[in-house]
Image (cartoon, grey):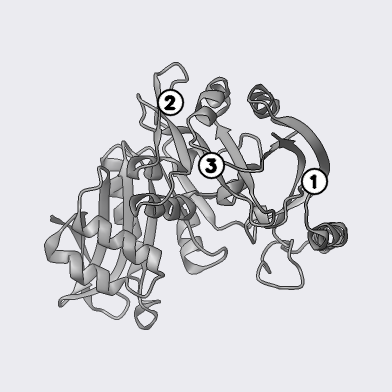
Amino acid sequence: MYRKLSEFELKSGQRVEAGVVIAPDADWSERLKDFLSWQDDIWNWQNSIFLESQTGIEVYYYVAHADGQVVSTIMSAECNGIGLRGHIWTPPELRRNGACAPLHGLQLKDFHSRGGKFFAAYTDFNSAAWHMYTRAGLRPSEPFGGHVSFENPDAELPSPHAETVIEALNWQNWATSAPLFMGRQAPLVRCAPLGLVGRRTSEYELLLELRNQLEGGAERVRVMRNLASQEVVGLAAWGWHPGLRDVCLLDVYCFPDYWDQAGALLDALELPSAHRYIAYSEHNCPEKSRCLEARGFSSSGSWRRYPVDLCRPPTWHLPASGSRSMLARLAWRIGHPVDHAVAWFWRHATHALNVDARVPARWPRFPHTRALFADLELYER
């Protein structure tokens, strides 16, 4: 269904109409899929699902269009007022013409009118979209980070006393997981098997996992959902360690008021047979350590101020003891001190010079230019 919102004039003088397509919608499906087809396969798959079938969540495509041509889009996927923004796109030849900012303003107004509580989005730091977001009141989760969020100050917080349910990952969980992973609570490594480190959205990682699950793959994720707010308040996952043979990596992460239920969340995982199971905790999250110890894990090593890289999946470089590969052990002994030294030097040098320590994240010579430091503890079973 299409609903007109407004009309506005571009810098070029052209009048465009702004409206919202409530998915699924057969009339707009092909037009929007074609407009957004430049993206990676996973996002094209997502658009096909949203525009062609019911998913149990509310999906809105905000569009600015004129003379049958789509000029700009913004997608919002929500459940009970909590959601994610994506597919913010204006073709290069149509940019700097004043199309996206007015559309974003209309989207925010519509979100407020529907009683929206929270949404999160990701874009490149210091990009035009990032500046548009911050001018509109969205806040970055980390300094110089591209993950931003908006929180309605009048929205009610989820009650820790409400009933919860543990279930497999679904579209509803995908849409409402952002407040959990964008929160300030410890620990820093939030889901090692999925590569979720620091305050960031879980949009991409959980989308990959959801597609794998819907296409018949192993169910590697379990979530705990607050039945009152429909918000994800805890998540557990497993995955094969990419650097160690036959080693299964586990993780669990919850809001502070829900750590007493983390054990049940871990127990709900259907774990494969493995030679060894490992998990990481941090010194500032004793609740997680106690949960792992209650499930038969024991501490086998710790690392103070270990650089946890935000530029690549953490499971490729998180420390692990007992590696059966001599080459892996050698790489660890050489690579860790070198990486740590580079991270320390870069952070202190850029601080002294008062410049951004995280912007050059793509520089191959500085693998930890977007590093954070964690006091890690390794648990094994």
Residue 248 place in picture, x, y as percent:
62, 45
Residue 209 place in picture, x, y as percent:
44, 51
* Residue 321, disc: 1
Task: State the residue position of label 3.
Answer: 272
Query: What is the distance, in whole Å, between disc 1 and disc 3 at their CAs?
Result: 21 Å
Residue 85 place in picture, x, y as percent:
39, 54
Determine the residue positioned at 64% across, 61% down.
311
Q: Are marks 1 and 3 in contact (CB under 8 Å)?
A: no
Q: Quadrant of residue 364?
A: bottom right
Of callouts 2 and 3, which one flags the residue occurring earlier in the amino acid sequence? Answer: 2
**Visible residue check, residue 147:** yes
How packed mark 3 is, by other alpha carbons closer than 10 Å (few <14, some 14-19, many 20 or more), is: some
Amino acid found under the numbered disc labelled 2: Pro
Where disc 3 sits, the SS reads loop
Of callouts 1 and 3, which one flags the residue occurring earlier in the amino acid sequence? Answer: 3
Determine the residue positioned at 58% across, 26% down.
256
Amino acid found under the numbered disc labelled 3: Pro
Outermost top residue: 161
Q: Nearer the viewer, residue 59 or 218?
A: 218
Where disc 1 sits, the SS reads loop
Q: Is residue 286 left or right of residue 346?
A: left
* Residue 276, disc: none
Task: State the residue position of label 2.
Answer: 158
Q: Height in image: 112 above or below 348?
A: above
How packed mark 1 is, by other alpha carbons closer than 10 Å (few <14, some 14-19, many 20 or more), is: few
Determine the residue positioned at 69% across, 25% down.
293
